[in-house]
Image: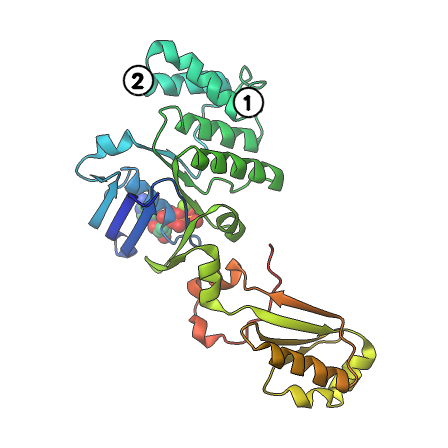
Amino acid sequence: MNDPMIEVRGLRKAYGRHEVLRGVDLDVRRGEIFALLGPNGAGKTTTVNILTTLVRPDGGTATVAGIDVVRHPGAVRRRIALTGQYASVDEFQTGEENLVMMADLAHLPHRSVRRRAHELLDRFGLTDAAGRRVATYSGGMRRRLDLAISLVSDPEVLVLDEPTTGLDPVSRTQLWDVVRSLATDGTTILLTTQYLEEADQLADTIAVLADGRIAARGTASELKALVADDKVRVVFDDATSLAAARGGALAGVDGLAEAEADDKQLTLTLPSSAPVHTIREVLARAEHGGLEIAGVSVVRPTLDDVFLALTQRPAPQATPNRTPQETRR
Ligand SMILES: Nc1ncnc2c1ncn2[C@@H]1O[C@H](COP(=O)(O)OP(=O)(O)OP(=O)(O)O)[C@@H](O)[C@H]1O
Ligand SMILES: [Mg+2]
């Protein structure tokens, strides 16, 4: 699990004067699901196109299974498959015909072409639709067929460029299951996405691409921890408590917790690293001041917080007063 499958060092690419990649470093381990996250135009497609030998870099190096993508593109292509941002299936052929055509192009032995096609149709839940023209498929079915096609040659590395953009939640979840099962079977997966939830759900490692470089990398939890500590949130939501709070009952918690109030709720937040006696003290003082506690919860930062902090100006340290948000998990 620890040997590197993709290694990228100082990768650079410009289109005219526009420097899209300005020194990208990436390490993807064999068998992991790695998510490259970035806003529109960050250079995600450019990066994966370089790795799959479709685009030549201006500088830096990239290897797949130890093979240099610029010096030995043919050998790299035998190990890596790309499912592009836009599904590339032939509308006028059936699902099965599409697969058989790609298996032929991949020079699979004639005897095994049909067997492989049927295996893949089965795996992707397309057996019933195998004989129908792709023009009649739904968006989710096309994506699955596209993915099946890229697996024809049994690649060691599968690159998915925004695999679920435009899919409804059900199709998206189905595709996630397929990706997970591929990884379980040992395929290394590099996916790009703009969906934080997708990275959160699927990826072992996440790298955020911003301003032509990797702005941060780590597990979802590591990235969340980068941006902010977990918070303990205490909510008071009855009118008497709010009135009491406004009347100064909270003066006692100053310095121990941050207080935020709107018309309906008063929220106290304090870092989860606060010692238990501090948390108890805050609750005791609030109760003493006549505040009825409606709920206590731990609030974790979400990947949205990370993403916004890393990909938007001003820089994270300039926005200290982030609103606590419930985590989705
Ligand atoms: N062939 C090209 N010629 C000129 N500019 C290009 C070319 N390909 C990409 N670019 C520019 O490079 C930048 C990065 O594009 P890229 O497609 O890699 O971004 P992306 O992160 O995949 O974005 P998206 O989320 O929209 O797919 C964009 O500003 C784009 O306009
Ligand atoms: Mg793209």
| Classed neighbour count for the residue bearing mark 1: other residues with Cα under 10 Å, few (<14), some (14–19), many (≥20) | many
Q: Is residue 117 above or below residue 221?
A: above
Q: Nearer the viewer, residue 154 or 232?
A: 232
Q: In the rendered structure, find residue 104 and report the number of the disc placed on it.
A: none
Decide if residue 156 is in sight here.
yes
Q: Residue at x 43, y 68 (%)?
A: 313
Q: Earlier in the sequence, mark 1 or mark 2?
A: 2
The residue under label 1 is which amino acid type?
Leu
Given the current orientation, which residue lies at the most extreme right position?
A: 240
Local SS, label 1? loop
User: Looking at the rendering, which quadrant does residue 207 occupy?
Assistant: bottom left
User: Looking at the rendering, which quadrant does residue 240 occupy?
Assistant: bottom right
Q: Is residue 69 left or right of residue 188?
A: left
Q: Residue at x 57, y 64 (%)?
A: 300
Total of numbered circles in the picture?
2
Local SS, label 2? loop
Residue 74 image point, x, y percent: 22, 30
Q: Which residue is mark 1?
A: 126
Color scheme of the displayed model: rainbow
Q: Is residue 210 above or below residue 33?
A: below
Decide if residue 93 is in sight here.
no
Residue 73 image point, x, y percent: 22, 34
Residue 224 image point, x, y percent: 49, 62
Q: Nearer the viewer, residue 245 or 17?
A: 245
Given the current orientation, which residue lies at the most extreme left position?
A: 71
Q: Which residue is mark 2?
A: 107
The residue under label 2 is which amino acid type?
His
Q: Residue at x 57, y 39 (%)?
A: 173
Quarter that holds the C terminus? bottom right
Quarter that holds the N terminus? top left
